[in-house]
Amino acid sequence: MKESEIIRVFMSEIKDKILGDDAGYIKFNEDWILITTDMLVWRTDIPDFMKPEDAGRKVVTMNVSDIAAMGGEPKAFFFSLGVPKDIDENLLRRIAKGIREGSRRYKIRVISGDTNDVSEIVIDGGALGIGKRLLLRSNAKPGDVVCVTGELGRPLLALILWSKGEDIPREVLEKARDPQARVEEGKILSEVANATIDISDGLSKELWEISRASSVKIVIEEDALPIHPTVKELSHNPTEIALSSGEEFELIFTISPENIPDIPFDFTVIGKVEKGRGVYIKGKGEMPILGWEHFVGFGNAKR
Amino acid sequence: MKESEIIRVFMSEIKDKILGDDAGYIKFNEDWILITTDMLVWRTDIPDFMKPEDAGRKVVTMNVSDIAAMGGEPKAFFFSLGVPKDIDENLLRRIAKGIREGSRRYKIRVISGDTNDVSEIVIDGGALGIGKRLLLRSNAKPGDVVCVTGELGRPLLALILWSKGEDIPREVLEKARDPQARVEEGKILSEVANATIDISDGLSKELWEISRASSVKIVIEEDALPIHPTVKELSHNPTEIALSSGEEFELIFTISPENIPDIPFDFTVIGKVEKGRGVYIKGKGEMPILGWEHFVGFGNAKR
């Protein structure tokens, strides 16, 4: 079964409405408690240009990013580790070091851990956050502009170069090995944005998520996409790379134009939200849902 | 490496003080937010007398029990599922059904889920709870009495009979397949008890945990142990079974004798807390730390 089928089967039995946003949430007094978990499977998620410390940091970042994408403030990290009995002690130590570095970067505590005997290495990380106002995928409104933080394309470019055995430029490797969650941006957006999502599976997939969840049409200007200069330089199809590149952990947000002056950080306006359905590239028709499996022979069922 | 070594290595690098209690916790305004995760590995945790629905319920119960053991009220369940791509759809559906049944039993919502491609089935469940006053392992006080809920021994007896290919009596199978977390008891204890722990790894191991964490001596009366009648009947060494049987999810608690009248549920006084160190059986010397691996050739690195 594909992951989409596994999710469908599971959810049809569980019957609670979940999996719809980056994190789950419950109301507690005046606040929202946010919870997310994201499992890293060593065999499929860690290309060998990543060091064990990078993997440890990444499992923190990918969970913290989900909290940021809901407008929450991350408070704590927790994990369950599954490792074979014969795991190398040094490898284990380096993964732990990465988790420590990640939790310090985001100023959160590691509050719970569990280890188990599993035949391959899996690190199931989780983050707990607190939010005042949730940024849901379903809250994009016609009239909003669509924006994105940072510059896109490097994580996928790194995988493409790696799969061809080519050198990966330093600035590309940096982002691929050590992406960062947009925590401060998420907190600010929680006060002014409408819908937000983080780019874990690629810009095109995330835009379709917002469009579907909010029942709106999204129109993107290809020329406005903030593609990283090295991606433009080294790739023949930089737009496709930017639309497909996952694990960017940049934030896509939709916001009423009048609230734009309230945003103190750098971002790029890439399009707008209209009445209707679907995601379009202006002048080119419907945007395909591009995944990075198209580019490299490496990946897992999640993408 | 053994699990204890894996934990030691990992924790020496992470440096946050964790893994000390049943759940992690952070203060939030006047309350405590509690988080726990517990991974179920199908190959090692699910004997074939358990049905897939039992496994789904169990992963909810083992996490909810950790919240109960901290005196918290469980609010939500979340999970990451790792399954091989060729998993049988019916098996998947039945696991999900068990998770639904478990979450309904404890009146909690399933708020977040994630699925991944892993070479063997792992279900990493987690629970979120809220507590007013925490029941820590480190809070046992000389002068307290030591108490336990329920009757002990059935989960281990089931494994022993199963490993020998013998019939498992109905009342033994019931507890082994579908143990229940002591949520109401935990909430009441949060107001009156000192230290609490749930029995996931066996009474003797849990008593040693309290003794070490609280720096106290615990003296148990063998004759007072509430051993299930069928365990007494079918086993030659019922005390050893009761001391070793894990996944009981009963609560052990220490409490000042003057608070005992405030407890409205059934429990058994099995001993007392004194100044000193270690766990003793009155008249017999130090209590060994017994695990159920001694009895059956089935288990994982956790025990």
Image: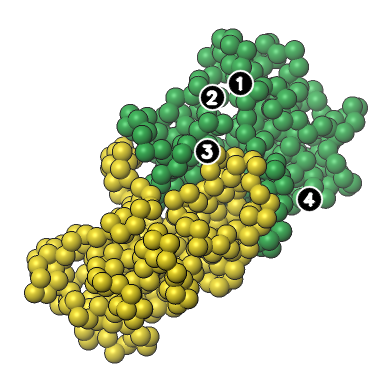
Chain colours: A yellow, B green
Q: Nearer the viewer, mark 1 or mark 4?
A: 1
Q: If you read the primary sequence from the N terminus, does the residue marked by circle 2 or circle 1 appear first?
A: 2
Task: Determine the image quadrant of residue A204.
Answer: bottom left
Q: Which residue is mark 2?
A: B47
Q: Do tag 2 and tag 1 residues touch (Cβ < 8 Å)?
A: yes
Q: Residue at x 72, y 39 (%)?
A: B206
Label 4 vs label 2: CA separation? 35 Å
Compared across the picture, whether A57 is left or right of B154 comes to left
Please identify, in this view, whether the residue under mark 4 or under mark 3 is nearer the observer. 3
Respond whether the residues carrying marks 4 and 2 are from the same subunit: yes
Q: Which mark is residue B40?
A: 3
Residue positioned 56% across, 9% down in the render: B167
Q: Tell me the number on the disc at residue B159.
A: 1
Q: Residue at x 9, y 67 (%)?
A: A285
- The chain letter under disc 2 is B
Chain of the residue where label 3 is placed in the rendered structure: B
- Dot 2 lies on which element? loop
Which of disc 3 and disc 2 is earlier in sequence? 3
* Label 3 CA crowd tier, 10 Å (few <14, some 14–19, many 20+): many
Q: Tell me the amino acid under the disc marked 2.
A: Pro
The residue closer to the viewer here, A274 or A181, is: A181
| Residue A108 visible (yes or no) | no
Badge 1 amino acid: Leu
Residue contact between numbered discs 4 and 3, judged by CB atoms under 8 Å: no
